[in-house]
Amino acid sequence: MNRRVVYTRGGSPADVLTVIEEPKPTAPERGQVLIRTTAFPVHPGDLQAVEAYPGEAAKPVPAGVEATGVVEAIGPGTRVAPDVTVGGRVTVFPQPGTWSQWIVADAEAVVAVPDELSDEVAAQMLVNPLTTAMLRRAAQEHPAIGYDGVLVQTAAGSSVGRLLTGASLVHNLALVNVVRSDRGAAELRKRFPDVPVVATEHPGWADEVRKAADGRPISVALDPIGGKLAEGLLDLLTPGGKLVSYGQIGEAPIAVHASTLLHKSLTLQGKNIGRWLSEASAERRASDVATAKLIALALKDQFDVAATYGLDELGNALEHAVRPGKIGTVLVRPW
């Protein structure tokens, strides 16, 4: 039998997600790969998709888009990525229904896992590193980044935030990290002692960011939170600066007066992995997947796991995934 996580309506993931049993998938067809899943991550975006699902589904909707596992079979005549072989370890993204013991995946979504990476890293090898590559590219589109301009990112202690910090150091991008608390700032300084960190629990956090920029223009801000924090970032940006929003952790909207945008010629831009999937060319996607692998190999110590649960503990995994202050990604082992 195959156990997998599904839902039939939108709402709180803890209320609407359930584990069902069904027959194990049959042999894959042309263009498909059968994978025995060994671990999958619980991303915030996964839970937001469940909450936002409209209406009632006629049949169960499979949950999850990323997982790692072992190839059990490859469909006849199927072209696969380099090093994808029967018995080999792979990661799958984007593939609806990865929260399952068995996955019949589109071959185009299957990527071989380097031997150097553990299952814990492999389960996170694509979504967060691809997001990191996307955000770094969005930042470097501004002509000042890489020269005299400073990049600021909020939620810097998150999984994506840590990867972006590592990537910024590799590419010599001036960066100021912003986190919520002094505790989070202290943890981040241990990991990246050369990168300034500011905690927003202090009323004067914006002035601390300016001080850390040391007179250089704050050209780009990356923010997955929104609300008042994003408004503060707009005030920090130099004329011609850009705010890139890539998440909706906060529920409050971003309130900005038109004069702020007009007088400073600011740009507000939204980025998310879903748009990347729909807009990127095949060449860009292949290049970014290769970059994601390099990020995973170079920064594997930054792929923290907050906790690992079994399918029978799904409710605990969902609660932990949204717990304030957690460090790392929550994983589920489906066996």
Image (cartoon, helix red, strand yellow):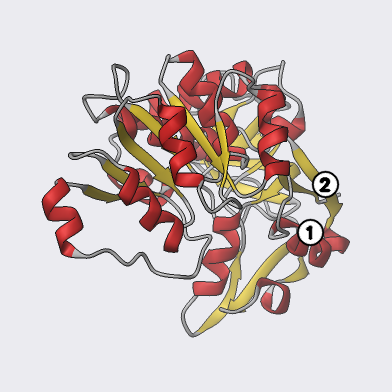
**Residue furthest to the bottom:** 56
Dot 2 falls on a residue whose secondary structure is strand
Label 2: how many Cα within 10 Å (few below 14, some 14–19, many 20+): some
Residue that carries the numbered disc 2 in the rendered image: 307
Q: Residue at position x 27%, y 42% from top? A: 242
Q: Residue at position x 67%, y 27% from top? A: 189
Give residue 228's position: percent from left, percent from top: 43, 62
Which amino acid is tagged 1? Answer: Ala
Q: Quadrant of residue 15?
A: bottom right
Tag 2 near tag 1, CB within 8 Å:
yes
Give residue 207's position: percent from left, percent from top: 44, 41
Q: Residue at position x 77%, y 58% from top? A: 320
Quarter of the image that includes the N terminus: bottom right
Q: Quadrant of residue 240?
A: top left
Q: Which mark is residue 317?
A: 1
* Residue 77 seen in the current view: no
Which amino acid is tagged 2? Answer: Ala
Give residue 10's position: percent from left, percent from top: 56, 78
> Is 8 drawn above or below residue 50 in the view shown?
below
